[in-house]
Image (cartoon, grey):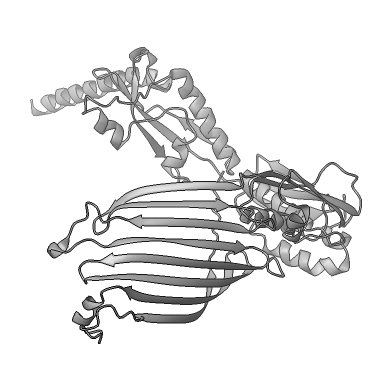
């Protein structure tokens, strides 16, 4: 009896398992066709986007989301839905774009060194009550594309190191060995383009103005390996034969030429060509500066060109504001970018602090000030690396809390020497003088040693004569992405 009961119980368990398998198979059948599209309509929206990685991938989910058309609501979008005043963003679902999204992701993986990715979305979930879909991409990246060999050739069988002149051979080998792309690593299109551009830039910086570099990636898709071949045609090594300046109207040609590090007869360098572009921008005279090589024969002479668009020579600014201790403020300035020619810049500014509406701590009146300054900047002093700044200023004020009126004058002179980009040495001299005006009783009350019985006596509060030397260095960081 007990044996037959166990057998019948086993049959029932087996029947439940079989029934569950049939139902699961019926449920998984439409999932095999990605998402049961019958459960969505034109009003379906995306609630979330997730990625299920079968293998480790070198990309973040946010990087993959940037590659697809569909988007999902973030924190702010969910918050705005709770506020009837704000209009919530739409996140529509499109079955056709979903298919295209898988293709976009596959192309992204191939560009980044995975030849056989598989992107699918069988785990995506549809909530028919809210008519929203949770997109879940299942990602299998496959094996990476491995670099098997790298070579730089000037022709079919000649290495670049054998083709260039002897004085450039050692620098070329040092540059080539410093490249980060190595055999055994994963190959990406981005890395290939980066190496190609780096080789071209190096050649142009040592004089090969018309160099050409092609990249040939021979891929074995079965073994997942790639042989990289860079075909380099340096062309003739050139010198600057002419400098063309276009677009300068009020700025004299010699002012433009003196800022350029490349002169007629110099060995061509793409880096120095771009440096001249930066130098002209820093004059604050031009809105647009384009440095390039016009159409010309591919020989040992190089014609360089700078195309300019001048900015308006004069500029007027006016500002107003409020400070807690000074009340209402008014500031204004007038600038001439090319004062008396020679790229000299003149700026005259004035400021007035009225004290109106200020918070008077302890019942004292607010500080009132008015003054002005003139700043003259000369960008070229005997050399383009040296600039000078001369700035006299005057200020007159009243401090009710101390019971004084005062005036202060200052002359500031600076010499700025640019060693290299973002690296400067500054020599500065400041000469200033401040003194009270009229009744000086307030100074006697704070221990300044002024006889109270002679309130109209005028004397110096201080004279300041300061010399200073400083240096500044900054690093410019360039970020590079994976694609």
Give percent across and percent down for residue 410.
45, 72
Q: Which residue is drawn at 13% across and 28% down?
A: 6
The total number of labels drawn is: 0
Please indicate whether residue 13 sits to the left or right of residue 148 in the image. Answer: left
Image quadrant in which you'd find residue 18: top left
Q: For residue 213, say whether it is visible.
A: no
The image shows residue 483 at horizontal and vertical percentages of 57, 43
- Using the image as rendered, state which of residue 141 and residue 267 is in the foreground: 267
Looking at the picture, tell me which residue is in the foreground, 365 or 146.
365
Let me know if residue 37 appears in the view: yes
Measured as percent of width and height from the top left, residue 478 is found at: 56, 55
Q: Could you say which is closer to the camera, residue 129 or residue 233?
A: 233
For residue 460, side relative to residue 167 (left or right): left
Q: Left or right: where does residue 173 sit relative to residue 84? A: right
Where does the N terminus fall, quadrant-wise? top left
Name the one closer to the observer, 318 or 129.
Answer: 318
In percent of the image, x 26 and y 56: which residue is there? 355
Q: In this view, does 306 lie above or below 172?
A: above
Rendered position, 308 above or below 260: above
Residue 141 vs 135, above or below: the answer is below
Q: Hey, which residue is sitting farthest left in the picture?
A: 1
Is 26 placed left or right of 236 in the picture? left
Q: Image quarter for residue 31?
A: top left
Residue at image position (25%, 74%) is: 439
* Residue 426 x/y as whole percent: 56, 73
């Amino acid at each position: 009896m007990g044996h037959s009961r166990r057998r019948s119980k086993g049959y029932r368990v087996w029947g439940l398992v079989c029934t569950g398998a049939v139902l699961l198979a019926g449920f998984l059948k439409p999932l095999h066709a990605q998402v049961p599209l019958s459960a969505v309509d034109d009003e379906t929206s995306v609630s979330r986007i997730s990625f299920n990685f079968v293998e480790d991938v070198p990309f973040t989910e946010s990087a993959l989301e940037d590659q697809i058309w569909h988007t999902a609501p973030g924190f702010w979008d969910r918050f705005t839905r709770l506020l009837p005043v704000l209009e919530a963003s739409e996140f529509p679902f499109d079955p056709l774009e979903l298919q295209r999204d898988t293709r976009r992701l596959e192309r992204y993986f191939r560009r980044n060194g995975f030849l056989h990715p598989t992107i699918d979305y069988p785990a995506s979930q549809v909530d028919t009550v809210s008519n929203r879909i949770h997109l879940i991409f299942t990602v299998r990246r496959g094996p990476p594309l491995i670099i098997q060999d790298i070579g730089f050739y000037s022709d079919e069988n000649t290495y670049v190191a054998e083709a260039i002149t002897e004085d450039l051979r050692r620098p070329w080998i040092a540059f080539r060995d410093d490249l980060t792309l190595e055999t055994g690593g994963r190959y990406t299109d981005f890395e290939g383009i980066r190496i190609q551009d780096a080789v071209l830039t190096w050649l142009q910086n040592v004089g090969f103005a018309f160099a050409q570099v092609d990249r040939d990636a021979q891929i074995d898709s079965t073994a997942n390996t790639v042989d990289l071949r860079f075909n380099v045609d340096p062309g003739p090594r050139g010198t600057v034969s002419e400098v063309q300046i276009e677009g300068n109207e009020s700025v004299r040609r010699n002012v433009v030429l003196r800022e350029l590090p490349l002169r007629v007869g110099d060995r061509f360098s793409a880096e120095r060509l771009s440096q001249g572009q930066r130098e002209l921008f820093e004059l604050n005279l031009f809105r647009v500066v384009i440095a390039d090589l016009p159409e010309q024969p591919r020989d040992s002479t190089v014609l360089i060109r700078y195309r300019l668009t001048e900015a308006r020579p004069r500029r007027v600014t006016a500002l107003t504001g409020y400070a807690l201790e000074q009340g209402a403020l008014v500031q204004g300035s007038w600038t001439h970018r090319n004062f008396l020619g020679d790229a000299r810049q003149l700026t005259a500014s004035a400021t007035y602090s009225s004290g109106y509406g200020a918070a008077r701590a302890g019942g004292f009146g607010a500080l009132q000030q008015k003054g002005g300054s003139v700043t003259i900047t000369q960008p070229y002093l005997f050399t383009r690396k040296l600039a000078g700044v001369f700035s006299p200023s005057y200020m007159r004020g009243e401090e009710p809390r101390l019971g004084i009126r005062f005036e202060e004058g200052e002359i500031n002179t600076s010499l700025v020497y640019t060693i290299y980009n973002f690296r400067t040495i500054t020599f500065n001299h400041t000469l200033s003088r401040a003194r009270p005006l009229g009744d000086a009783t307030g100074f006697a009350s704070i221990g300044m040693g002024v006889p109270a019985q002679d309130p109209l006596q005028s004397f110096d509060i201080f004279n300041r004569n300061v010399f200073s030397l400083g240096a500044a260095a900054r690093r410019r960081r360039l970020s590079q992405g994976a694609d």
